[in-house]
Amino acid sequence: MPLIAILPGDGIGPEVTSQARRVLEALGLDLQFEEAPVGGAGYLAAGKPLPDATLALAKRADAVLFGAIGDPRFDALERRLRPEAALLAIRRELGLFANLRPATLFAGLEDASALKPEVVAGLDIVIVRELTGDVYFGEKGHRTTMEGLRQGFDVMSYDEGEVERIARVGFEMAKRRKKKLCSVDKANVLETSQLWRDVVNEMSVQYPDIELTHMYVDNAAMQLVRRPTDFDVIVTGNLFGDILSDQASMCAGSIGMLPSASLSAWSGANGMYEPIHGSAPDIAGQGKANPCAAILSAAMLLRHSLVDEASALRIEAAVAAALAKGARTADLGGSLSTSAMGDAVLTELQ
Ligand code: NAD
Ligand code: IPM
Ligand code: MN
């Protein structure tokens, strides 16, 4: 029986993962669930954001459903003790280098987007974000300059192996979709990006059917709000992918709509599934959070780790049907609570 590790985390994390769990349970599959604290909750339970038992569970599980971490109460702790350290450590420990972040506009949500309905109608893009390298994982620290000024530094780097394996995910994803891949970098300024662009270009000869373009990240940010539907698959580094995916979420109506899959292999392997949003301290504990991103992350879990495409499609169809009937949390302009939104999806699942 597949074991699903549920790591609810902080803030709205537990609120949204509990709805995703209800949906998974309602499918009637033979699944086993085990929960463990992570982030601020891990720190409170065991003195560190990623307790040993939580990491062991994540490794042992067939898939991990993650909520969100982050709590302003812990922002002043040394970096290794902050909630965010746990998330980065799990990604690294499980080798989850490929982060798929689909941004799809569900029919009926055109008016929820910050952009004009005609600009976002039909939006269906995937951001493939590299997840275990870049400035996130380079040497970092702080020191005092010769002039006596405090200085912070974070080293940005990629080696060609890291670029090649994420670019391959981008090409393979494009192959299964509209065959358009846009690689986003800052090669006009950064050596890291020049290597990125060179490697992506070298690989493109293996994918003659894929229309490859390159875009600087500043232009990509602009094009994402100008003509988002021109994109199909975007492949980019860790930091640029983090920023562009939050931006893309507003093209799809709300950050509460975007799920993600963090993978070490395309399918059949342990992976971690989480909404792209954070712990949302401003609305935590009020039952206001949109659980759709977490529920859609559960669908990605079934698709990629459990290789159960039919169940994944069932969940996605239920979310679409609930939205089509007007079910909306506050971020989408409605008034449903987190659990009422979960109810609406469950009703459609039955
Ligand atoms: P955030 O994503 O938590 O919130 C940004 C805004 O979006 C807030 O106004 C919030 O209320 C809203 N929002 C987010 N998710 C929502 C949902 N499901 N439904 C409705 N509204 C939603 O980003 P932030 O405020 O910059 O960060 C808060 C904390 O979360 C920080 O500690 C940060 O480090 C952490 N964080 C964690 C993750 C993660 O766990 N993967 C991701 C991003 C940020
Ligand atoms: C995300 C988050 C994380 C990231 C933080 C909390 C470490 O923003 O999952 O998008 O930057 O990757
Ligand atoms: Mn982010």
Image (tube, rainbow, N blue to C red):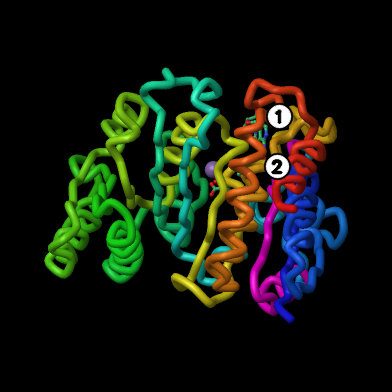
Left or right: residue 48 versus residue 191 is right
Q: Is residue 89 visible?
A: no
Residue at the outermost front position? 350
* Residue 291 location (% of width, % of height): 70, 42
Crowdedness of circle 2 by 10 Å Cα count: few (<14), some, many (20+)? many
Q: Are marks 1 and 2 in contact (CB under 8 Å)?
A: yes
Depth check, front residue: 56 or 230: 230
Between discs 1 and 2, the one toward the N terminus? 2
* Residue 181 location (% of width, % of height): 26, 51
Crowdedness of circle 1 by 10 Å Cα count: few (<14), some, many (20+)? many
Q: Which of the 4 image quadrants contains residue 168?
A: bottom left
Between the C-alphas of marks 1 and 2, the distance is: 9 Å
Label 2 CB sits under 8 Å from any ligand 1 atom: yes
SS of the residue at dot 2?
A: loop
Q: Amino acid at mark 2?
A: Pro
Label 1 CB sits under 8 Å from any ligand 1 atom: yes
Left or right: residue 219 versus residue 343 is left
Residue 291 has which mark?
Answer: 2
Is the residue 94 above or below the residue 258 in the image?
A: below
SS of the residue at dot 1?
A: loop
Report if residue 171 lies within the magenta region: no
* Residue 28 location (% of width, % of height): 77, 67
Depth check, front residue: 62 or 240: 62
Q: Is residue 121 visible?
A: yes
Is the residue 176 above or below the residue 342 in the image?
A: below
Residue at (70, 78) in percent of width and height? 2
Residue at (65, 21) in percent of width and height? 333
- Pointer 1 residue: 329
Residue at the outermost right position? 45
Residues rendered magenta in the picture: 53-72
Left or right: residue 210 versus residue 337 is left
